[in-house]
Image (cartoon, rainbow, N blue to C red):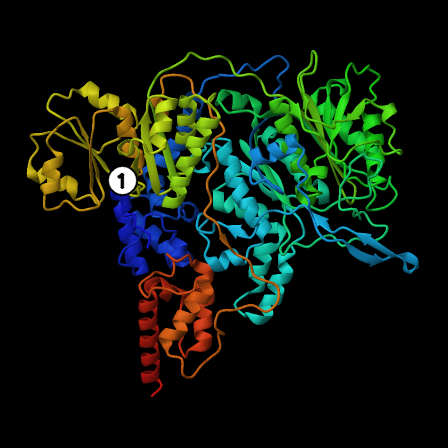
Amino acid sequence: MSTLQPPATQTERILAEIWCDLLELDEVDVLDNFFEVGGYSMLMQLVREQIAQRIGIRPTLTELFIHSTIRSCAAFLDGSAQKQEAVAPAQERAESPDSVDSGAGRRDTDIAVIGLACRFPDAADVDQFWGNLVSGVDSVSRFSPKSITGPGGRTREYVPARGLLEAPEWFDAGYFGYTPREALLIDPQHRVLLECAVEAIEGAGYDPDRFPGQIGIYAGCSLSSYTEILRAKQQEDGSITDWDILTGTTSDYLASRVAYKLGLRGPTANVQAACATSLYAVHFAAKALLAGECDLALAGGTSVRLPAKLDNYRVGGITSPTGTCRPFDAAADGVIGGEGCGITVLKRLSDAIADGDHIHAVLRGSAVNNDGRDRAGFTAPGVRGQVEVIRAAQSAAGVTPSSITYVEAHGTGTRVGDPIEIAGLNQAFADGKPHEQPCLLGSVKGNIGHTDAAAGIAGFIKTVLAVERGVIPPSLHYSEPNPDIDFAAGPFAVVTEPTPWEPVGLPRRAGVTARGLGGGNAHVVLEQPPSPLPRAQTADDQVLVLSAHTPAALDELTARLAAQLTDHPELELRDVAWTLQVGRRLHGHRRYAVVRDRRDALRVLGGEAPERLVTGDHARDGRAVALLVPETADAEVVRRWKALGLNPDLTLHPDCGDAEIGSALDTPGRLFLEIGDSRLSARLREHPRWTREHIAVTVTDPLAALGELWLAGLPVNWAAAHTSQVRRVPLPGYPFQRQRYLLEAGPAAQPPSSTPDAERDTRQTVSMLFTEMLGLPDVDPEDSFFDLGGDSLVATELVARIEQLLPVELEVRSLYLAPSLREFTALIEERMRDSAVRHG
């Protein structure tokens, strides 16, 4: 069961009393949402009246709807919310002054690529994907040949093939607060995007909860195959509703699901443009940043089929009969389907430089359009639209075609599609200026297949990494040119081996194209990132902080960080510390270590000094803090500690009396931070009002003090702990603790049927519905329905099912009053007895 977070301020205590009185609750968590613990609109009006009477402020109902937790409402009423919002951007900028050479030719319209995440065949993350690309790995899975009857009755053999993800049905439901049942009802391609979104934004070095601006997301997905499975299961399991299927599988709720679970408050839009979907998303995200609609933007796409279904070959279709995608090659005979997910994080370049972000590449310009009717048919590509979209993107980028030395093409490996695409590229790059060096050409589809809605982002991520690292990966399965491609008419040459990329007199600059069935075209221009400016070296100690949702994840995260420091000795420890401090979501299980240098960090993280790797699970938001100071401590010492983010509401000295100590202990969960030896910590622990929730820590090192504050869940001013310029750097992603969630096609074991049974008693009925609605094998009678993952929607459905099976009338609020299986059963039995008495 979760730990209740009690009120920490006078305003919070008043609000908690009001809530408990009106909602008829014994206690309430300061982070509970009013409308999820039994509240409703009419009751909120009574809350407003009580606030006016007891606090003297009369907020509007709109304000109370916005600030619907005790914590946020109290902050709003106290005025701290406005104050924090006003100073946050300035603090963010103060953390990292300009540390990058902005370079000649930088423009206000340039966009920085600061985060990347992906899952593609044979690749669980960006580094594995890049390693496969550079090594020329073909990640398509091929199966035993099959036969098909073609025109004239002739039999033709083909090789079923597809680029498959490894275990896409495995998902960390607990990290996102989903019950097992909820996870089962969400399309796996939605789940994969959720996890990639977390990895991308952490890879950029940002925690959405602490980001001072607006974060938007633009994303799209393929047609859901999971819908069919849910529809079939719905016939067997009446608890699966149309609403479950709609919200769990349709594309309309893809981006908004990510925004909800990550707490993103900027523009949220689903994008659908067939195979060009995810590059369209990148374009829209960049435009939103330039328009000031958001300050950080995620963009990408996902395409996962479960169960995996190989493309059905058809004579005359676009699927390769040989099971191999050969872009631009004479033997090209069609495309291979693939699965994957990719997402990027974008930011205005000027902001990224000012904030010390790690910049993978610069997006200089982008464009989208449609071929219209100027093509052979609805599913056929055109040339004019492609030429126009490329020229529009180059114009937006302010570059000439001759300055671009690599193009990641759509490159599907179809006999007709590739020549049309190269014809369009030749026209778009014919600017009348000589090309001093060839423009290399490639397509990622030879490696992983055509990933549909994720195809554009696959090519984008590949090209961003090439621009950043100065190597162009080979385009697979190319030996001689497709005879219908006129390579002599343009500057293009297919890259067939890993090629160092250092253009003479030019920055590394590339174009990325995506084309969608239906005529959609998208093109972006990328450029190598600006070089960071040199900084003064520092030998300062650093505090490394790690947090995770579970102890197992925390251990794995510790091991990953140690491996990263081993594999990347170029990482500066101050940047690693800074990124961990400000760029990771805060979880309950925490760990910190104060280290001297990289070697010392590896020693501590590796377990060689366990006493220095401090772990705790007592993090609590809003703890009160008392400072315990020795007699010799002067005001300047106290001010220095406060500058590090310590904001005590009282200070105790050695000569304080028992009454003063008792008063301090009256605040639940208070942290007592002892500076040096004040001889007070022993008196605190011996006091009769001391409880296990109180914490007393003695420190002499300011960095260790910050670690202890952070460990206890208190906010820390990390900028004050750094005396030199710091930057965000890419670090290992969160180690999700996945389990398998997949509704199998065909007959499968289901929860017990929810039909009336004369012999089933009330306890069995309620227990059956708890397990069924929450997707759990069993439920402890004392566990709260809401602690197990239930919410207001599931509660509403549960109450409706109870009324179908038992002779009782209930309100949803009754489950909030009696949330455990034991309590709810007792309440139902009491209601049934009362009803029997009333009806004689």
Please identify the quarter of the rendering in which residue 767 is found: bottom left
Indicate the quadrant containing the C terminus: top left, top right, bottom left or bottom right.
bottom left
* Residue 462 seen from this side: yes
Indicate the quadrant containing the N terminus: top left, top right, bottom left or bottom right.
bottom left
Residue nearest the observer in this picture, 595 or 241: 595
SS of the residue at dot 1?
loop
Please rate how many residues cluster around mark 1, counting C-alpha atoms within 10 Å: few if below 14, some from 14 to 19, many from 20. Answer: many
Residue nearest the observer in this picture, 147 or 613: 147
Please identify the quarter of the rendering in which residue 55 is found: top left
Return the x and y of residue 440 as percentages of the image width and height: 75, 24
The kind of residue on which mark 1 rests is: Arg
Residue under the image location 36 percent in, 26 percent down: 601
Residue nearest the observer in this picture, 76 or 171: 171
Residue nearest the observer in this picture, 96 or 486: 486
Return the x and y of residue 259 as percentages of the image width and height: 52, 44
Check disc 1 and report the residue beneath it. Answer: 623
Relative side of 680 to 24, left or right: left
Total numbered badges shown on the rendered structure: 1
